[in-house]
Amino acid sequence: MLGCFDFFDYFCIPSNESNRIIHLNKIIMTTSNVRPASMERITTPALAQKFIDEQIKELRAQIGDKKVLLALSGGVDSSVVAALLIKAVGKQLVSVHVNHGLLRKGEAEQVIRVFRDELNANLVYVDATDRFLDKLAGVADPEQKRKIIGAEFIRVFEEEARKLEGISFLAQGTIYPDIVESGPVKSHHNVGGLPEDLQFELVEPIKLLFKDEVRVVGKELGLPDNMVYRQPFPGPGLGVRCTGAITRDRLEALRESDAILREEFAKNGLEGKVWQYFTIVPDYKSTGVKDNKRSWDWPVIIRAVNTRDAMTATIEEIPYSLLHHITQRIITEVSGVNRVLYDLTPKPTGTIEWE
């Protein structure tokens, strides 16, 4: 997941669009944004608990009796921030989870179950599936898709923020690599781009942590493993894996095939071993045979890569027997699919994602 610093770059929102709806606050690299050399790396539950206790004290001092707003994606960074704030200020936190219809199978339900049902969070769930998919109808260009998804997310979040009263703070899941990679001066996107009249003081409790430390803290906070160790997932979600113009039936085939792949990787010890794995359903079909009849259906492409820095990537050598089993499950269980392919292309020349 990219940090909040990268929101507009990642969605590729053009400057004329972003200038209309955003206000950029220049954040200078002060000592508060520099990780002290003496700061011990969080590698154990005891160190994680020490960090949690310190942050709860600091958050209570900063926030007092005021309210905090958080865009909760379900990724590890925003989830850890949410869990910390729930411990610190409870119902003073208002978390907004926007389902744009491009999440993986079960992700929105998991956010609701963990935060609303188990942690008793003040959670606002917005199902904006139809709104996003209607906007994306007929749009084939990947950059345009990113722009639409990013801009629409901002509009939805803005609408929800305006419904709330008494919000003084905005919590964000900024982590230390976001700060380091941004350089000495960074244009920081307030709420991923809320207008000037919706300005909040930032709350960034994990901004000095590296990703591995965030995961240790998440475990200590009691978050489920599949949330703590969630794979990197692009901001536009499945929108960049349903290549070309998105259709609802092809999106559903993508979501179901991806769920099968993730289930089989987990059962066969590859979850956590392979850096990123997913399926792609392209916008073309091939001839096949199903139920003794000619079929004209989509292929599913499996992608599984390992990398240290995402600048280069190698292909995971999945056992053939497992590939065969996954293929059989996909062509049997997923409607509209008659072929499964395995992408053997490293980076370079291929990128990790297809769009």
Image (cartoon, rainbow, N blue to C red):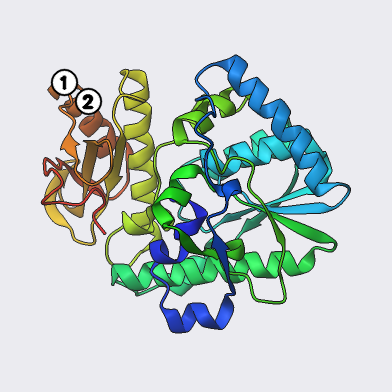
Left or right of 57? Residue 71 is left
Rendering coords of residue 172 (x, y %): 61, 51
Pointer 2: what residue?
A: 325
Q: Which mark is residue 280?
A: none
Pointer 1: what residue?
A: 321
Q: Amino acid at mark 1?
A: Ser
Name which residue lies at 84% across and 63% down. 165
Does any portion of residue 128 appear in the rendered image?
no
> Do tag 1 and tag 2 residues touch (Cβ < 8 Å)?
yes
Name which residue lies at 16% across and 35% down. 315
Q: CA distance from mark 1 to mark 2?
A: 6 Å
Left or right of 55? Residue 236 is left
Rendered-image quadrant of the C terminus: bottom left
Which one is in front, 301 or 9?
9
Rendering coords of residue 204 (x, y %): 63, 47
> How many numbered marks are there?
2
Q: Residues within 10 Å of mark 1 (few under 14, many from 20)?
A: few
Which one is in front, 179 or 35?
35
Q: Amino acid at mark 2?
A: His
Q: In the rendered image of this protein, does residue 245 appear above or below residue 49?
A: below
Name which residue lies at 29% across and 71% down. 140
Image quadrant assignment for residue 170: bottom right
SS at badge 1: helix
Does any portion of residue 183 appear in the rendered image?
yes
Left or right of 166? Residue 181 is left
SS at badge 2: helix
